[in-house]
Image (cartoon, grey):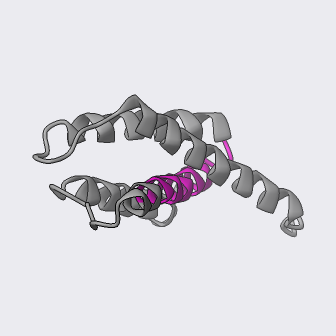
């Protein structure tokens, strides 16, 4: 695999993972909106891991099982990371929510790939 292909496929994964890490490093994301704050944060979990699942499936050339495993492992490590951030805590519930987002991203990836016509030889 050429260096440019590796960069093209894996740089977006690394940048997105770094963004997730940076957001997890913020001491408190409380907006003061009460229940809406909770709901919006969980929606953010789903969306950020949906994108990670898509990017990993693309980087791994459609190997969705590997993409799922890597993304869930990253989600678990991110929740562990949050245990060391003041004002944050990691939960297994958030890993499950992240896994839902990953599965959604992978489903989108598979669906779009099936709809796309095969490349010309």
Q: Most prominent secondary structure in the magenta stretch?
A: helix
Left/right placement of residue 55 relative to residue 45 reads: right
Q: Position of residue 101 (x, y in %)?
A: 57, 49
Is 6 contained in the magenta span? no
| 13 or 23, nearer to the observer | 23
Based on the picture, tell me whether residue 48 belongs to the magenta stretch: yes
- What range of the chain is rendered magenta? 41-63
Quick check: can you spot residue 73? yes
Q: Is residue 27 above or below residue 65?
A: below
Say which residue appears at 49% left-offset and 44% top-offset.
Answer: 98
The quadrant the C terminus occupies is bottom right
**Residue sitting farthest toward the left:** 86
> How many numbered discs sit on the rendered protein?
0
Residue 3 is at least partly visible in this image: no
Residue situated in front as seen by the camera: 4 or 37: 37
Q: Residue 90: horizontal and vertical position, in percent?
A: 29, 36
Q: Is residue 100 left or right of residue 12?
A: right
In the image, farthest residue toward the top: 92
């Amino acid at each position: 695999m050429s260096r440019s292909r590796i960069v093209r496929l894996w740089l977006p994964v690394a940048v997105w993972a770094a963004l997730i890490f940076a957001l997890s490093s913020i001491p408190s994301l409380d907006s003061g909106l009460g229940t809406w704050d909770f709901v919006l944060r969980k929606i953010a979990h789903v969306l950020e891991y949906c994108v990670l699942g898509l990017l990993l499936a693309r980087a791994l050339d459609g190997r969705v099982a590997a993409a799922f495993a890597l993304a869930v492992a990253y989600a678990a490590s991110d929740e562990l990371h949050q245990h060391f951030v003041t004002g944050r805590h990691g939960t297994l519930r958030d890993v499950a929510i992240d896994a839902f987002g990953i599965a959604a991203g992978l489903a989108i990836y598979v669906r779009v790939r099936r709809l796309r016509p095969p490349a010309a030889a």
